[in-house]
Image: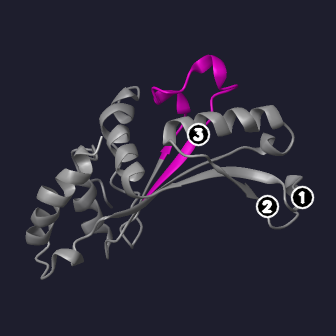
Amino acid sequence: MQLLKERFQKEIRPALQKELKLSSLEATPKMVKITVNTSSKDFKTDKDFTAKTKAWLGLITGQLPVERRSKNSIAAFNLRENDIVGLKVTLRGDRMYDFFQKLTSIVLPRLKDFQGVSRNTFDQNGNYSLGLSEQIVFPEVEYDKIGRIQGLQIVISTSAVDAKSGEILLEKLGMPFTKENNKQ
């Protein structure tokens, strides 16, 4: 599965340097990490659901998720300090490239009526956020074993200095963006 990482090092990185008119190869933007998050209000009460969510999240990322706990009590949300509010996986290195390649070539095309992902969710630092409404688009997830349909958030952090260079980087890596740029 190291095809994307090798292609990035040998072909994409030098092409990015020329396109962005950078003096050094080290100044070219690259992916730093991919963070996969999921959350549910039921984590604090349903331990079986939490275990099932940990299992499928670990299966799709290849890494065990970390529990994220609340820092404060909020009575309006029926939340106590130290309750589990989410699960997070941070991917770096080879696992990051493997996950990105799987996401762009297998998972996103499996979405219903997929026309490409939006170009509008870059932040000013060139990081990209993508939300999926259901985890069953991943081929590793078996519908009978997950408990219920759940969404997840994927954040791709880059070393880009602005949104445009981050967009160029992800486009070269194979992110299937929509054809037209709908920025307003």
Q: CA distance from mark 3 to mark 1?
A: 25 Å
Disc 3 marks a residue whose amino acid type is Leu
Label located before the other in sequence (3 or 1):
3
Q: Return the residue at label 1.
A: 80
Q: Return the residue at label 2.
A: 70
Horizontal placement of 76 versus 152: left or right? right
**Viewport quadrant of the N terminus:** top left
Determine crowd level at label 1: few under 14, some 14-19, many 20+ residues with C-alpha closer than 10 A.
some
At a point 13% along the width and 58% down the height, the residue shown is 10
The mark found on residue 57 in the picture is 3
Instruction: Report which quarter residue 156 is drawn in.
Output: bottom left
Which colour style is shown? one colour
At a point 34% along the width and 50% down the height, the residue shown is 97
Disc 2 marks a residue whose amino acid type is Ser
Horizontal placement of 144 versus 115: left or right? right
At a point 87% along the width and 55% down the height, the residue shown is 79
Determine crowd level at label 2: few under 14, some 14-19, many 20+ residues with C-alpha closer than 10 A.
some
Extreme-bottom residue of the structure:
23
* Secondary structure type for disc 3: helix
Q: Position of residue 45 (x, y in %)?
A: 87, 40
Q: Position of residue 178 (x, y in %)?
A: 27, 44
